[in-house]
Image: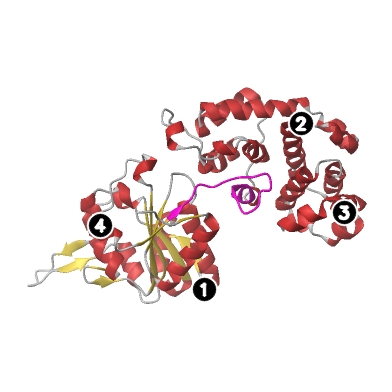
Amino acid sequence: MVQLEVDHSTLEMLLERAIETKIPLFIWGDTGIGKSETVYRIAKKKAGELGREFVVWNKLSTEEKYKVAENPSKYYFLMDNRLSQVDPSDLRGLPNLNQKQFVEWKIPFWLYVASRPKSAGIIFFDEINLAPHSIQASAYQLILDRELGETAISDNVSLVAAGNRIEDKANVYELPRPLKTRFTHVTLSKPTISAECRNDWGEWALKNNVDMRIITFLIQRPSLLSPKVSETDASNAIPTPRGWAKFLSPMIKGVKDLTTLEKLASIAVGSGAALQFVSYLKLQKKINLDEILKNPSKASDVKEVDMMYALVSLVAEWYGNKPSIDKLDKTFQIAKYLKAEFATLLLHSVKMKAPNLFMSKDVLTKLKSWKDVADRIRKYYISRE
């Protein structure tokens, strides 16, 4: 049977609806494409809507967890409950040997907090199908009936799960039919990237300050954002959206040496992708940025597509190091001599680095350079905003 496959934006909508209605949702998809991050982002958004403080339960100290337990109405929590790392007793708890004629249960701390009447949040069963069937079975009652043993979770607590598919070769267990029927199901499609960086991974990357060299490289090599499993089987490090953004981007910040860049890229996204990435970066060495900054009209001498992407990356990186009105003025002057699609990408990237500066009245009303470039690319730029 074909299962609904959606992009990140649609997943957010479905996830928000599932949380509102307290209907369990299972998110399927390849590794490293943002399943867990989407749950985190929506949980944080929900906390803001409810006027509660957002906390990730697993990152709290014992003292902080007690504060949440004592003041449940103050917080909105995200509990990452990895069934692959627990025993059945970790879910239900242990019998309390109180010498009575019946058994009472000492429930785990997380379940106690989730069961408080004023508690609100998400219990997230990430990588649930990495757990063997005997452990998965322990969650049946919680997911369907919102109870574990004699303990019911709060009406304001939602249940979400995520996992890889068998075809992703993630060493997962087939989800038992009884557990499948306790969830609604959706598959998250692999992210895409385009030159427009609109409603895709490129737009997300710009907003989240991913290294511009990575973004412009992947625009030209979109297949390397998240290759098919069959193309990466032999490697340990493989290209994934997570590998590019969460691993490689912070590691190469400020790094210029190509040999070092290749090593860092190899451990983050694999040697094959690293070689192509460094080959692209070599193009930047052919561009004299100082000369273009002194005479922006020199930007029109850059003709090849890959060289224009390299120039956009260089200028965006230069601007991003202590943005200022003077730098923005120079960036606009350079953009004036770029083809419209490249000027648009450059302006969108610098806007993301310092949006308040970019949108200030001093810029929009006083800089002639802005007026010059805006008139030329208005239909491209405005259509993406």
Marked residue nearer the N-terminal end (1 or 2): 1
Marked residue nearer the N-terminal end (3 or 1): 1
Which label was assigned to residue 179?
none
Residue farthest bottom in this picture: 117
Q: CA distance from mark 1 to mark 2?
A: 51 Å
Residue farthest front in this picture: 1
Which label was assigned to residue 50?
1
Q: Give the prevailing secondary structure in the magenta stretch.
A: loop
Marked residue nearer the N-terminal end (2 or 4): 4
**Amino acid at the residue labelled 2:** Glu
Nearest the camera: 112 or 309? 309
Residue 285 lies, in percent from the top left, at 74, 26
Residue farthest left in this picture: 101
Q: Which residue is mark 3?
A: 375
Q: Is residue 271 above or below residue 21?
A: above
Residue 291 lies, in percent from the top left, at 87, 31
Q: CA distance from mark 3 to mark 1?
A: 43 Å
Q: Secondary structure at mark 4?
A: helix
Which label was assigned to residue 304?
2
Q: Which residue is mark 4?
A: 177
